[in-house]
Structures are given as C-alpha cells and as structure tokens.
Amino acid sequence: MRRFIAVTLAATILMAPLGGCSQPIDTGSSVPAQSQPFVALLALIGLGIGLTALHHHNEAHSGSGGTGGNPIGAQFSVGPFISGYKPVDLVVDPVNVSLGALESPLGGGGTGKFTEIQDISNAAQPFGTYTLPANYSPVAVAMDVNGLTWFVDATGKVQGCAAMTLGESGTCISQGTFTDGLGAGSRSIVVDVGFIFVIMDAGGGKVKWWALQATPPGTGTGTYTSTSTSPVYAANAVELTTTPPSGFTVYHQDGSSDFITFALSGSTLSLTQQANFLYTPASLVGLSNIGGEVSGKDAVFGFTGAPAGSYSMTKYETATANGIGQATATSELIDFNGQVGNPSAAPFTAPLSAVHLDAGENSIWAIDAAGRIVNFAPF
C-alpha cells in the first residue's frame, strides 16, 4: 500500500507541467538545470521505496511466527482466583495435571496462599487452595513428581507442604521446615524426589547454594564460581535437568548456563558445576522447565525482545538435556507495540514472567504484568 501511494504520487508529480522550471536547483551541479527537478524527484522516489522496503524488512523480522506486527494470541488468560492476592510464581503439578500458583497478598508481607487450576477446554477451572503458615509469604515454589511442594521466602525459610487435593481449602500440611542460611535476597528453588536445591546470585559470576538430600540424608552449602560472569536471574534461575541422578541447570542473564551435580560424602553434599548450553538470544526471564519434543529433542521456553515493542516467546531446543554448544532458538511474536493478537484473543500485558511448560506439554503458562495467569499453545 505504501509503495502504491509513493508510485501514484510520483506519477502525479511527473505529469504536472514543468514549464519555467529551468532555474537550477544546485548551481554547482554537473546536471543540466532543466534536468535537475527530474533527478531530485527520482532520488525522492528511490528514498521512499527504500524506506518502504526497510519498514517491511523490520516487520518481517519481528518474530518467526506472527510476523509483520501480527502477534500470535494467547489461548486464554485469567485474573488471580484469590481476592486481595496476586500470583508471584508458578509450578506444574504432574499428579493433578494442573498448574499451581503461589499467591502473595497485595502490598506484600502477610500470609501467602497456594492455589491450583486445571486447563479444561482452554478455560481455567479451580482445583484447590491452601493457606501457608502465618506470616509466611514465599517468593518461589517448586514441586516434585509426587506433588510434594516446597516454598522459600526472601529470608531463606524453606517450607514443605503435602500434595494438593481436589477442593482443598484448609492450611498447608507441613512436610518440614528448614533455613538455607544464604542471607536475605531473591532466590530460586527446585526439587527432585527427596532433594531440595536453592540458589541466589553472589555477584561476579558467583552463585550461593544450599541443598538437602533426604535419603541417604545429607546437606551442603557454599558458593561456586561459574564460567560466566553474568548474574543469575532474580527468579526461576534453576530447573531440574535429569533424574536420576539429580542434575540441575542454573541460568544466567547473558544466556549461559551451568550444569550442576552433587556427591554425598558422609552426611555432606558437595557440588560440581560445568559449563552448559548457551541460550541466545538471552531470555529476559529465567527459562522454563524442560519438555520433550516429538523430534526427540529437549526444549525450554523464555521471552525475548522488548516488552514495549516487538516481544516474543522463544523456544530453545537441544539434542540432549545437558551439554556444550548453542541451543537452537525459534521465536513467535506475541506482542507488537501493545497488540497481543486479534480482537478476540485473550488479553495480557507484557512483560511476562514465571514461564512454565505443563506436564502434558500442551500449554505454556506465565504471569503478566497485571497479575493475570496467561496460557499459550506450544510451537
């Protein structure tokens, strides 16, 4: 359309009478005076076509899916289920085939809650909710394959709760309480069966950690130095990689990652880390849990681009769960200058956080800037 307007305008100008236009535009030019208006006009036409081509080029490279400013819409989005609360982290429940949301009181502090929802025909249905111990408001949540859920707050208090039951509405059934001893600050948590791992950034590529193993019993804590000098993400910076044995991936903000394993000596856990895959372009948030692809590859999801401009969901694929090299990245545009799909698409507000792939790998979940829980189809 822009090209049609430019060409039509050019033709109109060319057909206009040019009598009396022999006054030179540039007295120092080697172009004859009577030809200078035509040369200038052709230069303007070329500039217009070039700008139009550049515009189309930029549109076509805003994402590999939903390109040209036409974002792929969300399947649905829902507001927080608990009045006066907002979701701060998500976790996949493989037992109930549901999504768990850690909810904190609006305004901070107070007592947190944990609620689960199920995706029924692209609509969220409540499953159950329990209240956490008094005045305990965690910042992160993780769950094992048996539905046992662990939380950690900004002071390092780790709380375990029994698996959610349908229609639950009481208080967390405690499975144990610990202190990670890492000090105050943002941290991430991940669990395997009988294994808890908490990390937080220590600056300069260093990572503080605390781990507990139930059987045989052991604990460990310390600080390791990554091959990357980039900080880890403030949230969702660690995910389970393989089981068994327990292996974990720690994600850094520059797209690099560390592969973590543990060894038990007596009752003391020691940590071994090595460089792992590079995820580029780097995600703006900590990456999702790992999901298996039909191709046999492993995939994780994140968000890239600019929340106020061209904003995409990005899938990173690798041939193995851990290794060296660069993950293969594919992106889908989900927000272009505030446009988040066709008029009937589910609303959400960028940026998104707490990205998770569900147990059936049929949905990608995240929390938006307005506190909505948003559901996307995998690609």
Image (cartoon, helix red, strand yellow):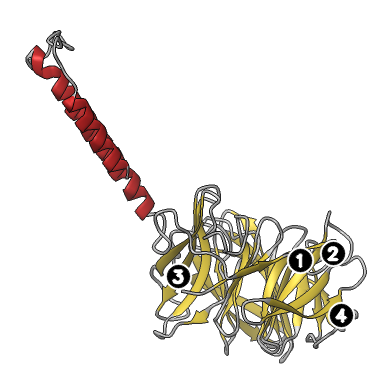
Instruction: Judge from the rendering whether residue 42 lies leftward or rightward of residue 147; answer left or right.
Output: left
Secondary structure at numbered mark 3: strand
Q: Mark 2 sits on what residue?
A: 83
**Residue 318 position in % (x across, y down):** 42, 76
Q: Quadrant of residue 217?
A: bottom right
Q: Nearer the viewer, mark 1 or mark 4?
A: 1
Real-space Cα separation, disc 2 to disc 3, in angstroms: 36 Å
Q: Amino acid at mark 3?
A: Tyr
Real-space Cα separation, disc 1 to disc 4, in angstroms: 19 Å
Q: Quadrant of residue 52?
A: top left
**In the image shown, does 33 or 227 lie closer to the viewer?**
33
Quick one: label 2 or label 3, which is nearer the N terminus?
A: 2
Q: Pointers 1 and 3 in contact (CB under 8 A)?
A: no
- The numbered dot on residue 328 is none
Quick one: label 1 or label 3, which is nearer the N terminus?
A: 1
Instruction: Judge from the rendering whether residue 342 lies leftward or rightward of residue 174; answer left or right.
Output: left
Quick one: label 1 or label 4, which is nearer the N terminus?
A: 1
Q: Amino acid at mark 4?
A: Cys
Real-space Cα separation, disc 2 to disc 1, in angstroms: 7 Å
Q: Mark 1 sits on what residue?
A: 80
Instruction: Judge from the rendering whether residue 302 lies leftward or rightward of residue 151; answer left or right.
Output: left
Q: Nearer the viewer, mark 1 or mark 3?
A: 1
Q: Mark 3 sits on what residue?
A: 316
**Residue 39 position in % (x across, y down):** 14, 24
Quick one: label 3 or label 4, which is nearer the N terminus?
A: 4
**In the image shown, does 200 or 163 lie closer to the viewer?**
163
Q: Mark 4 sits on what residue?
A: 172
Q: Amino acid at mark 2?
A: Ser
**Residue 11 position in % (x across, y down):** 20, 32
